[in-house]
Image (spheres, rainbow, N blue to C red):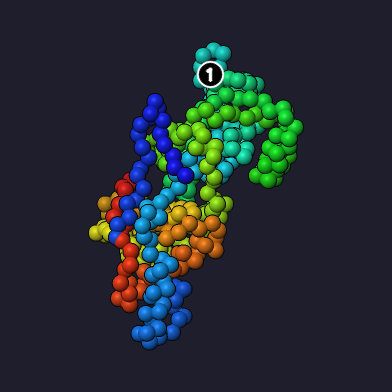
Amino acid sequence: MSSSSSPSLLSSPLPSPATVLSKKPASLRAVPSGTARRWVRVVAAAAAAAAPVSAASQARPSAAEVARTVVELAPSGTLSVVGPDGWPLGVGARFVADAAGAPALCLAAAEVAVPDAPSSFHVEFRQSGARTPQCTMLGALTKPSDESVLKKLSTRWQKKFGEQIDQDLLYLISVDRVLHMEDFNEDGMWVVPSEYTSAEPDPLRNSAENLVEEFNSKHAEDVHRIYSIYVESDLQVADVKMIWVDRLGFDLHVNSGEGVFAVRIPFSRDVSDEKGVKSSFNMMSHHAWEVEKSYASPEFEKVQFLKKVR
């Protein structure tokens, strides 16, 4: 699902997707050495599953999908309105998203809980302490009265916060315009509202943080090796950290004497759960080790795009 910018709004695009061109992993250390013929079979299987090729290798979630994911993950945001005295007023509010991604806020402050008032709601979610994607929705507050809508929102609130919500304090904000930013100091992109509401949040959103922590703490050597083999770069690297993973691939931050660089490593196919992520990561790790040891030739085009982030 793609996301496009409105020609009448900001024209600055988000950072473009990574253009994909062309020591043994921990998971293999206990495997005894085999014959050359056995290595050929292993190499072929790993390469077929691990090599990012064709258009899939350039894929990353659309801005609409990332915005939906941020809204699902963020526990709170900032609602801003213009008060009767003409001054802008912003207050923090916890919220849940309805099925179409519209935020449902719990508001006790009468100064901002004004139905039909033009409003904006800003949310952000910090990924692994390294990047903060965010989105701002412009619309108007409405007071839901339909019992079925209130029941669904109350259920979502209970699931997200583990507590009941006073339905009299629930307000929905319409999604008339959506501005998405990949991080602080990045250009923004206005997302078409219909694309935002029809997008699906990333299926790995609730497990991504734990997966990233596991890969960085238990498989740091493999993360570094995948970077070394799958990325074309002459940087003198001090450290490589995974910062996020989604259904289409994962993002790395590379620390060097020249600064910190971001690079995207795509999976060869979509994944939808933790098992799929770990399977794809293991295959890539195995193949990277085999290429490093000259047991196999790389059957993929290396990633050649690194973006300096600081």
State how many labels appear. 1
Residue 258 vs residue 267: left or right? left
Whole-percent x and y of residue 276? 52, 62
Nearest the viewer among 22 and 211 is 22
Q: Residue furthest right?
A: 147
User: Looking at the picture, does residue 242 appear above or below residue 107?
Assistant: below
Residue drawn at x 37%, y 84% is 37
Q: Position of residue 230 (x, y in %)?
A: 33, 62
Q: Amino acid at mark 1?
A: Val
Give the quadrant of residue 174: top right
Residue at the disc numbered 1: 82
Q: Indicate the position of residue 21 as horizontal and vertical percent values.
A: 30, 57
Q: Residue at x 45, y 64 (%)?
A: 281
Q: Please report the residue visible at 55 percent of the width from the left and 60 percent of the height from the top.
A: 274
Does residue 125 appear in this view?
no
Please give left or right for residue 232 compared with residue 163 in the image. Answer: left
